[in-house]
Image: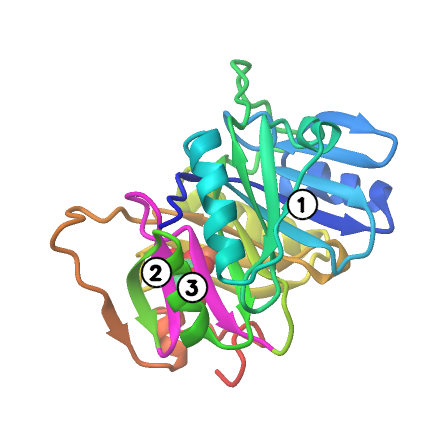
């Protein structure tokens, strides 16, 4: 069993680093940690970085998860290879470019690029946002899945994810007490379905709603409230069509031992209990 400890980062390829920086700082509200010739590193919390835009194709999207140590990384590589996943070990220079000690890269059954990392760096310096969006931290990602039922088996049986709730076949899965760190959404191709940052309170969600509208940032879903985690949310589009979410109040699972996933119907109200419609984010809803 591959024990995922935490979400470490997202890496997004882009042909236009300047536009990505303008968005990440002027709209999303992250802090520039470092600019390199071919990459931009952004912070949102105590992590040394949680988002990296790098020069590359926009289809190049990677999610990094922390594992305990080198032994756990080696065991994960062996388990994945036994299941015929192609595993690539990152070089020291690549690890340094991720602020981690070591990492491996592989693809999940849909073809999403996943990295497992050891010792992702934190920074003692307080996150100092470029815009007062109220961000308190990088929280979860939605992943495209060509077969959510198959991929749920991968994430819960090969890895340690547990299903907190399902909407139709969409599993919202946790790797710690947070309601979900990963959700799988039906799609025709691999990719990141959305990237969530938590904000402090519902006032921040609504302030951003008006801010984004004023700045002509496409809003794709919300403001609304998820009946699953209870979070109040807003989804909007960034460069290369990548969808970001602000939300507040993603709940925690009170009792790991006794929690049973709830099954929600696949209908708009299961995505937003206030009545916002997912507007193309969720196929057929
Ligand atoms: O569309 C359903 C989303 C549910 C939630 C939630 O319960 O908070 C998400 O944030 C998500 O899947 O990303
Ligand atoms: Fe979300």
Which residue is situated farthest in the left direction here? Answer: 258
In the picture, measured across the screen, residue 178 lies left or right of residue 207, that is left
- Residue 107, position as x, y percentages in the image: 60, 58
In the picture, measured across the screen, residue 174 lies left or right of residue 262, that is right
In the picture, measured across the screen, residue 246 lies left or right of residue 254, that is right
**Where does label 1 land, which residue?**
11
**Where does label 3 land, which residue?**
154
Judged from the image, the secondary structure of the residue bearing numbered disc 3 is: helix
- Up-down: is 109 above or below 79? below
**Of the image marks 1 and 2, the number of the one nearer the N terminus:** 1
- Residue 85, position as x, y percentages in the image: 57, 60
Q: Which mark is residue 157?
A: 2
Q: Examine the structure image and report whether residue 81 is included in the region drawn in magenta.
A: no
Quadrant of residue 20 within the rendered picture: top right
Q: CA distance from mark 3 to mark 2?
A: 5 Å
Magenta stretch in the rendered image: 168-187
Q: CA distance from mark 1 to mark 3?
A: 22 Å
Which residue is situated farthest in the bottom direction here? Answer: 284
Q: Nearer the viewer, residue 37 or 65?
A: 65
- The residue lying at 62 percent from left, 57 percent from top is 86
């Amino acid at each position: 069993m591959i024990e995922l400890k935490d979400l470490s980062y997202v890496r997004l390829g882009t042909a236009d680093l300047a536009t990505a920086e303008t968005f990440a700082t002027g709209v999303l509200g992250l802090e520039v940690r470092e600019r390199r010739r071919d990459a931009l590193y952004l912070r949102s919390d105590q992590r040394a970085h949680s988002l990296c835009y790098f020069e590359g194709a926009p289809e190049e999207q990677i999610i990094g998860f922390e594992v305990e140590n080198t032994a756990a990384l080696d065991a994960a590589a062996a388990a994945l290879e036994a299941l015929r996943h192609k595993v690539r070990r990152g070089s020291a220079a690549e690890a340094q470019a991720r602020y981690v000690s070591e990492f491996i890269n592989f693809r999940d059954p849909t073809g999403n690029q996943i990295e497992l990392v050891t010792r992702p760096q934190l920074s003692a310096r307080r996150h100092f946002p470029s815009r007062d969006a109220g961000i308190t931290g990088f929280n979860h990602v939605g992943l495209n899945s060509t077969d959510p039922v198959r991929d749920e088996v991968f994430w819960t049986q090969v890895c340690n994810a547990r299903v907190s709730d399902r909407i139709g076949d969409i599993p919202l899965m946790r790797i710690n007490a947070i309601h979900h760190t990963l959700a799988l959404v039906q799609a025709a191709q691999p990719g990141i379905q959305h990237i969530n940052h938590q904000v402090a309170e519902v006032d921040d969600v609504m302030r951003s709603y008006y801010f984004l509208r004023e700045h002509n940032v496409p809003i794709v879903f919300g403001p609304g409230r998820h009946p699953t985690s209870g979070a109040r949310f807003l989804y909007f589009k960034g460069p290369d069509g990548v969808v970001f979410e602000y939300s507040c109040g993603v709940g925690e699972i009170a009792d790991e031992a006794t929690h049973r996933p709830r099954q929600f119907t696949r209908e708009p109200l299961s995505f937003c209990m206030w009545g916002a419609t997912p507007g193309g984010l969720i196929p057929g809803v």
